[in-house]
Image (spheres, grey):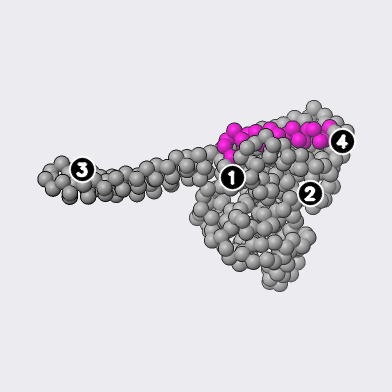
Amino acid sequence: MTLATDQKLDQQGLSETSRSLLRLREEVLNQWQRMVRTQIPGARDVTNPVLINTLPAFYDNLAEAVTASYPRETATGHTNAATAHGSERARMTSFSPDQVIQEYQLFKAAVLHVSAAHGVQLTAAERQAVEQSIDNAIREAIKEFTTMHLGMRERLAAGLSHDMRSPLAFIASAAQLIGISTDIDAARRVALKIEANVRRLEQMMEEMLDALTFQRSEKLSLPLSEFDMLKLAQEVGQEFDGMNPGTVEVLGTAVTGHWCFNAMRRALENLVVNAVKYGDGKLIRIYVDQSCARVMLSVRNTGKPIAPELHGRIFEYLHREDKSPATGWGIGLPFVRGVAEGHGGSVTVDSAAERGTTFLIDVPVDCRPFAGA
């Protein structure tokens, strides 16, 4: 089986090199984590589920791309997995842009070092697929990372600019009052108030400076409980399959963790509704797996693929494609994104005519450190 974003459950059609890389996944990721924690200061105190991020799925995408005949030229082809990685780094860590670049460079080094140590000899074309995949991932991750931080800074700057008006207005009025006052005691009282408002402004400026270096976006407030994600998927699958037998199958392994049950259920239901609406009437698959202390909940359907340029836009609030014969994409996917990010994770889409369309919710198994109780 693979953890790739196209919900490929077996290794059929993959080359021996790809299969070898898949067998080395855990060793590569472990070496990468050791290298990152040693060489990137911002990673030393990051918990394992946050540090590993979406990389297990990206790694398996990379293994697929090494097979020339498989319909994935690079690990980033027809999926926004790298974009999701950049978004998580902006929301969940204090990484800087150069550290995001460095972690991908270390990822490439780990892939090449571990594969060589196990006698996996990459051809020139296979090595090029690896390097091109990681170069593409760097560009996409940094673009989203920068966009996220710019948005955070703009919102913060707008809010603080508004809040600064009050102390500034008071200071201006108080200075005029002191200028015309003949009562020294009254002037001293006004001066103390000016001093207090100056301290308020200094605090606001410190907050802005802190945010210019790091600012996390707001998370949803989610009541958490312990449950088995596979059982939840089975419940949702049975409900939809009961309405139209033979349309939904649920596969995977039991994964017990701490999430918001109602939010996860609604998010999964939204993905299945979209799969029914935009699929071609064939089987819809819900799959549950885990890797590196993260649960991977995915929904796959076949049918007309989503164009690559829409992979980010479909998660925007009230976005809907006018040319689509079905109504939707307005609130459901933005809600799914909010649930995934509120749990300290991400949602990605992988869509191509040859592989179908898969939405993947990838979050920590234990979300208690990252989500509001």
Q: Main secondary structure of the magenta part?
A: helix
User: Mark 2 highlights which residue?
Assistant: 2
Residue at 54% over, 61% down = 221
Q: CA distance from mark 4 to mark 3?
A: 75 Å
Which amino acid is tagged 2? Answer: Thr
Tag 4 secondary structure: loop
* Residue contact at pointers 4 and 3, CB within 8 angstroms: no
How packed mark 1 is, by other alpha carbons closer than 10 Å (few <14, some 14-19, many 20 or more), is: some
Q: Which residues are magenta?
A: 95-116
User: Mark 1 highlights which residue?
Assistant: 93
Percent coordinates x, y for residue 329 in the rendering:
56, 56
Eye-nearest disc, 2 or 3 = 3
Q: Earlier in the sequence, mark 4 or mark 3?
A: 4
Q: Earlier in the sequence, mark 1 or mark 3?
A: 1
Residue at 56% over, 47% down = 91
Q: CA distance from mark 1 to mark 3?
A: 43 Å
Residue at 54% over, 58% down = 220
Is 97 magenta? The answer is: yes
How packed mark 4 is, by other alpha carbons closer than 10 Å (few <14, some 14-19, many 20 or more), is: few
* Camera sees residue 236: yes
Eye-nearest disc, 2 or 1 = 1
* Residue contact at pointers 1 and 3, CB within 8 angstroms: no
Whether 241 is drawn above or below 318: the answer is below
Q: Earlier in the sequence, mark 2 or mark 3?
A: 2
Q: CA distance from mark 2 to mark 4?
A: 20 Å
To which quarter of the image does residue 325 belong? bottom right
Q: Which mark is residue 118?
A: 4
